[in-house]
Image (spheres, helix red, strand yellow):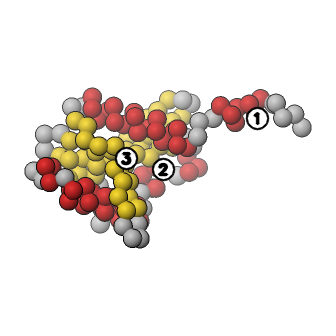
Amino acid sequence: MNLFSVESANSFLEPSNKEKGDFGEKLVLAKYLNEGCSFVAKNFTTRSQKMKSEIDFIVKNYSDLIFVEVKTRTIRSCGYGEQAVNFAKKRKLKMGVDFFRLRHPEFDEFFPRVDIAVVEIKNNVPRIEIFENISLN
């Protein structure tokens, strides 16, 4: 077995899941900003005794405060990104949204909205699909 084969070299060049996720978040945030939204917060985290919640980023437009969960996928065998937002993840998102709104009354006049953004990367080409105003129930 050759430890320096092309296959082993490629494994060193493959980005980690965190790097892929960060890349997807940057792409989606840029899309919202290009559409006229303003940046509010990134990686907003809260904890309760039983659960931790993190919202990838929060932006606002003229009427909505938009809480965005980004799912980045490079292979379909992991499932569709939107399928990763199951009941448990929705509960965590709801907790994060509620806590953010409680801590930041300056946004009370905005309608809270939760979007799921799916970034699929195939042959190094990203495709973004956004599911707007998903229900957290």
CA gap between label 2 and label 1 equals 28 Å
Q: Amino acid at mark 3?
A: Asn
Q: Residue at x 31, y 58 (%)?
A: 96
Callout 2–callout 1 Cβ contact below 8 Å = no
Which one is in front in this view, the residue at disc 3 or the one at disc 2? 3
Q: Earlier in the sequence, mark 2 or mark 1?
A: 1
Name of the residue lying farthest toward the right = 1
CA gap between label 3 and label 2 equals 22 Å
Instruction: Point out residue 41 in the picture as x, y percentages from the top left corner.
Output: 29, 43
Instruction: Point out residue 112 in the picture as x, y percentages from the top left corner.
Output: 20, 53
Q: Which residue is mark 2?
A: 80
Front one among 87 and 2: 2
Q: Which residue is mark 3?
A: 43
Using the rendered image of the protein, determine whether residue 12 is visible from the camera's viewpoint.
yes
Q: Amino acid at mark 1?
A: Ser
Q: Is residue 89 shown left or right of residue 98?
A: right
Instruction: Point out residue 30 in the picture as x, y percentages from the top left corner.
Output: 33, 31
Q: Which residue is mark 1?
A: 8
* Position of the N terminus by quadrant: top right
Q: Amino acid at mark 2?
A: Tyr
Q: Residue at x 40, y 34 (%)?
A: 26
Q: Earlier in the sequence, mark 3 or mark 2?
A: 3
Using the rendered image of the protein, determine whether residue 87 is visible from the camera's viewpoint.
no
Q: Secondary structure at mark 1?
A: helix
